[in-house]
Amino acid sequence: MYIPKYFRVTDIDEIREFVQMNSFGTIVTTKQGKPIATHLPLQLIKEGDTYYITGHMAYGNPQWGTFETCEDVLVMFQGPHAYISSSWYEEENVPTWNYQAIHVYGAANILDEEELKQDLTMLLQKYEKHRKDPVLWDKLSPQLLEEQLKGLVGFKIKVQEIQAAYKLSQNRSEEDYHNIVNKLHEEKDLNSQQMAEVMKKRVQHGK
């Protein structure tokens, strides 16, 4: 991914938090030279000093068969994005687009059944624990779980490289930056409003 120096992010804690908040990612592999992709909920976990991305897909999805033949699997995560009008700048310029994106490269392996159960347990815990009647692994019937497991393939990607880009108008003047935030707040588009909040928080945290 092309990342100008203004927009490159290297802080692993910041990247990890971003993935946790934007964990519906896209996995890209190749089959006979043709790129194929699947959109999935994923988890970024740390074991010792190594990071892994874990997830699962339908057994009927042919992509999992490419994991062992691809040297590199690409996983993409994206946050809010928004059109930036150059009419919001002090000086004449051209419009652009702000966004947050993270690309992760690594080697994938298939999980065994016990590892898949553990990963699904963690996934349910993440998205259900705060609910009034959480649907957690140990609350579901063994018969239902056994039936569902037959249709799933779990995977684990050992992270070998991370490329993170936050294009958030860091190259603009302070006055332009604050004006962009205000203008984005005025937009009716939800992504624009979310982008305004992201930019506002980065200023508050001194980034």
Image (cartoon, helix red, strand yellow):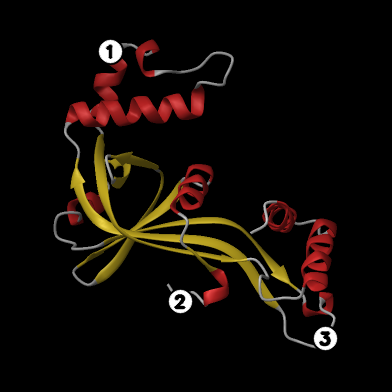
Secondary structure state at the residue bearing disc 1: helix
Q: Nearer the viewer, mark 1 or mark 2?
A: 2
In the picture as drawn, the residue positioned furthest to the front comes out as: 206
Quadrant the C terminus occupies: bottom right
Amino acid identity at mark 2: Tyr
Residue 92 drawn at (x, y percent): 81, 88
Q: Nearer the viewer, residue 3 or 96?
A: 3
Task: Name the residue that disc number 1 marks.
Answer: 142
Residue 177 drawn at (x, y percent): 77, 68
- For marks 3 and 1, the one nearer the N-term is 3
Q: Indicate which disc residue 51 carries.
A: none
User: Would you say residue 43 is visible in this rendering?
Assistant: yes
Secondary structure state at the residue bearing disc 3: loop
Callout count? 3
Check the image and report above or below for 122 versus 93.
above
Secondary structure state at the residue bearing disc 2: loop
Check the image and report above or below for 194 versus 101.
above
Task: Name the residue that disc number 2 marks.
Answer: 2
- For marks 1 and 2, the one nearer the N-term is 2
Check the image and report above or below for 62 versus 161.
above
